[in-house]
Image (tube, coloured by chain):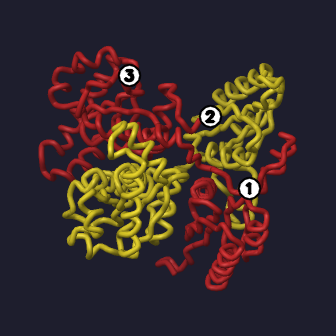
Chain colours: A yellow, B red
Amino acid sequence: MEADGKMAKVRGAFFLSDRTGITSETLGNMLLTQFAGVQFDRVTIPFINSLSKARDTVARIDAYRERHGEPPLIFSTAVDDEIRAILATADGVFMDFFESFIARLEDTLGVRASHSVGLAHGANPSTYHRRIEAVNFALAHDDGARMDHYAEADLILLAPSRCGKTPTCLYLALQHGLRAANLPLTEEILEAERLPEALTRFRSKLFGLTIDAERLAQIRSERLPNSRYASREQCARELRLAQGIYRRLGAPSLDTTHVSVEEIAAHIIHQMGLKSILR
Amino acid sequence: MEADGKMAKVRGAFFLSDRTGITSETLGNMLLTQFAGVQFDRVTIPFINSLSKARDTVARIDAYRERHGEPPLIFSTAVDDEIRAILATADGVFMDFFESFIARLEDTLGVRASHSVGLAHGANPSTYHRRIEAVNFALAHDDGARMDHYAEADLILLAPSRCGKTPTCLYLALQHGLRAANLPLTEEILEAERLPEALTRFRSKLFGLTIDAERLAQIRSERLPNSRYASREQCARELRLAQGIYRRLGAPSLDTTHVSVEEIAAHIIHQMGLKSILR
């Protein structure tokens, strides 16, 4: 019971999968974010790849239902017909991401689907290799560590300290197999209001990040509290100078304040016309 | 035309989204992997967040249809009613991941969905913070660089060189906000057939990776061709000793040969009962 005497709405949401659960969680969560007023109790059950695991899952959901009263939501991406048939008997609202579309696809393509677990996330050796190589590239070229292989980079991220360069580069490497270097816009570069000479020939690979000054000050304060580095004024000044540099270079840029790493990566790929290995 | 005179089946597949396209691609690809005999020409169109972009998308799909003959498959996660109405007019087989489930959810929850673009991928500042912190932790504790903060680690990955420790730790950090350290099983550790003393009290955090010896030799050969390090025998020996260590420690382990980074991460989280920030 909450202080105002109303029951908080909490609804169980199960994400079921015969593999990792990633797809089931991703689509399920997209749908659930549409109901801002409802609180969800999320449970992911991955690797349901046998009839006995399917039965255990049903027992777990039924027990949940008994404890909580309202029928939980169930999102499933399981593909095996027998496993799906068992899961569908659970005491909840069953949403089958596989069954809802597969019949229509079979009709359209004139081919029967395999209905067996496939390599959904592509552990394809050549893709794996590209991703690992890209991670090594990102690590070697993090934070301006070296500037000698920019010709091989797919992109070069620019930003003042703590705007999210490193996670973005690592995500671009791991998820999309892209070689992303990054260069911090240091005091020296910002004062000069231009980039080191060596970078000018890679102008088309440059992408800038910005962030809200208040947020940047907060992030920096966790690292160096009460420093000039973390002051609101210093952050605002660096961001203003950085934006001037992006503008003069004609480099696209993005404000990362309210954007997740996945989304920053997607924006960069889209704006720069890069090719993810996923596509 | 192929050599045997049959036309290769290539079907257009469009992944449409008002945001990053990640959900649309993920679920769409899961469905397409069910049709191993069909080749797909995949196009992702993200950030369709205005009526004019929706109209441009329809024009692009219609042009594709005209060039290729057969109606392309269209997977959409767009949530805005007007934008969806436009996209649905495209000349293809329209699969609406949003509309197919949202009405049922509205009925069940007794609440109307917002039908507007939400924070699907959670650019929640506290989550962002945990992910960045976890990335910093992974970078600081990569490859046995330091062993002084293992008490704060959510897990410690063990494996011989080049079995995928670093990408796995980075993925666990970026995607799941988990603090993952990793320790290479060096010749010294493998010879001793046991871990450094400092690690014994973190036994419950240990997880081992293995890989097929042939595959490991191939990966190492790209780095140091014709070396003892990259020889089939040396790889097989290291992997055998590593497995002995995992067994004696009672540490769970996973063969990564045919498994993507996402899947390795999902297995580890599942087997070790860790809590991803996504859940």
Does the rendering let one see residue A90?
Answer: no
Q: Secondary structure at mark 2?
A: strand
The amino acid type of the residue labelled 1 equals Phe
Q: Chain of mark 2?
A: A
Tell me which chain the residue with mark 3 is part of: B
Q: Say whether disc 1 or disc 3 marks the residue closer to the N-terminus.
A: 1
Q: Which mark is residue B98?
A: 1
Question: Disc 1, disc 2: CB below 8 Å?
Answer: no
Answer left or right for A219 relative to A183: right
Q: Is residue A107 something one can see in this rendering? A: yes
Q: How many marks?
A: 3
**Left or right relative to A277: residue A18:** right
Instruction: Name the residue nearer the viewer: B34 or A233.
Output: A233
Residue B261 rendering spot, x and y as whole percentages: 43, 45
List the residue tagged with mark 2: A44
Residue type of the residue flagged with mark 3: Ala
User: What's the residue at 33%, 64% (across, down)?
Assistant: A156
Q: Share a chain, discs 1 and 2?
A: no
> Which residue is the site of mark 3?
B251
C-alpha gap between disc 1 and disc 3: 42 Å
Q: Position of residue A235 (x, y in %)?
A: 39, 52
Chain that bears disc 1: B
Q: Tell me what residue is drawn at x 69 percent, y 31 percent.
A: A41
At 51% from the left and 63% from the top, the residue drawn is: A267
For the N terminus of chain A, the image quarter is: top right
Q: Secondary structure at mark 3?
A: loop
Distance from disc 2 to disc 3, alpha carbons, whole Å, reads: 23 Å
